Image (tube, rainbow, N blue to C red):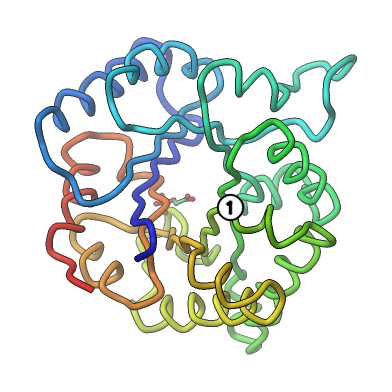
């Protein structure tokens, strides 16, 4: 059986006090509860060490939202994979569409970031997804295949096998326009068959593929019930415990 995951992507939200309060609130809400999925939390960099402290006695996994592609040195403003790992974070989001669109991160840059993360033992949550015009032109499968091909490049199957993939159609992110379970499932199945072709059946079957884009407490059960959807990468709805908990608890209602 594949891992089931609900991951929070806070993006650039919450000051230090608010952020650490949110971590504590989530820890409190999960205390003593038997939950059916893994929970990952990706706050901004400045929250990482404080969050790690609060998450110590819990199963919640800490993640960063980005890393430098360089190892270390004169790169003002950047944060290295090694620095992130030293906080206790175990995962890192790479290739989010906002990084691609606003910071010019292309396949070559993302490839370097993936290598850097893996070499420091950080598990990448690698994001792919098409824009609305690409879907309307019928190019969505090709766009996603190309994003995977460029960023994975010559990375071996053993390393690919350590990753998490998130399908996030750009037109669904923060817009309230969730992809229907059928549309999402179709792409998730496409990604799994891409993985099977390139890296073999076992990598493909093991890979958690998360859906992201206006996922919330009302649509999570129908999305997570799809055979190839293994959880969600949650933006807006991860910023308040009362919105995030129903997404985690959605897994209680999914039997597959
Ligand atoms: P959203 O963001 O849930 O606010 O649509 C998801 C994401 O961008 O990871």
The residue sitting at the right extreme is: 74
Q: Relative to 149, does residue 39 appear above or below in the rendering? A: above
- Residue 209 lies, in percent from the top left, at 47, 63
User: In the rendered image, which quarter is residue 99 located in?
Assistant: top right
The residue sitting at the left extreme is: 32
Taking 32 as reference, is 230 left or right?
A: right
Q: Quadrant of the C terminus?
A: bottom left
User: In the rendered image, which quarter is residue 193 located in?
Assistant: bottom right
- Residue 232 lies, in percent from the top left, at 38, 56
Q: Relative to 154, does residue 114 appear above or below in the rendering? A: above
Q: Relative to 59, does residue 243 appear above or below in the rendering? A: below
Taking 208 as reference, is 215 left or right?
A: left
Q: How many marks?
A: 1
- Residue receiving disc 1: 163
* Circle 1 residues within 10 Å: few <14, some 14–19, many ≥20: many
Residue under the image location 62 percent in, 78 percent down: 196
Tag 1's secondary structure? loop
Q: Is mark 1 within 8 Å of ligand 1?
A: no
Residue under the image location 69 percent in, 37 percent down: 117
Residue under the image location 16 percent in, 51 percent down: 249
Report the front residue among 156 and 24: 156
Report the front residue among 53 and 198: 198
- Residue 223 lies, in percent from the top left, at 30, 70
Residue under the image location 33 percent in, 20 percent down: 55
Q: Quadrant of the N terminus?
A: bottom left
- Residue 147 lies, in percent from the top left, at 72, 66
């Amino acid at each position: 059986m594949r891992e089931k995951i609900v991951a929070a992507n806070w993006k650039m939200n919450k000051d230090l006090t608010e952020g650490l309060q949110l971590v504590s609130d989530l820890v409190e809400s999960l205390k003593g509860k038997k939950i059916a999925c893994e929970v990952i939390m990706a706050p901004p960099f400045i929250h990482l060490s404080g969050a790690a402290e609060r998450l110590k006695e819990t199963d919640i996994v800490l993640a960063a939202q980005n890393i430098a592609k360089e190892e270390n040195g004169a790169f003002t403003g950047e944060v290295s994979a090694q620095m992130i790992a030293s906080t206790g974070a175990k995962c890192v989001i790479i290739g989010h569409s906002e990084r691609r669109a606003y910071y010019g991160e292309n396949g070559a840059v993302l490839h370097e970031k993936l290598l850097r993360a893996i070499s420091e033992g950080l598990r990448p949550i690698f994001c792919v997804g098409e824009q609305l015009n690409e879907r309307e032109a019928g190019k969505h499968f090709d766009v996603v295949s190309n994003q995977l091909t460029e960023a994975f490049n010559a990375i071996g199957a053993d390393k690919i096998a350590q990753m998490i993939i998130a399908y996030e159609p750009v037109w669904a992110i923060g817009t309230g326009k969730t992809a229907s379970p059928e549309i999402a499932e179709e792409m998730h199945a496409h990604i799994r068959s891409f993985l099977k072709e390139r890296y073999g059946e076992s990598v493909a079957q093991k890979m958690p593929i998360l859906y992201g884009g206006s996922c919330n407490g009302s649509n999570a059960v129908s999305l997570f019930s799809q055979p190839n959807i293994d959880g969600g990468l949650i933006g807006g709805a991860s910023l308040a415990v009362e919105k995030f908990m129903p997404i985690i608890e959605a897994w209680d209602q999914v039997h597959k």
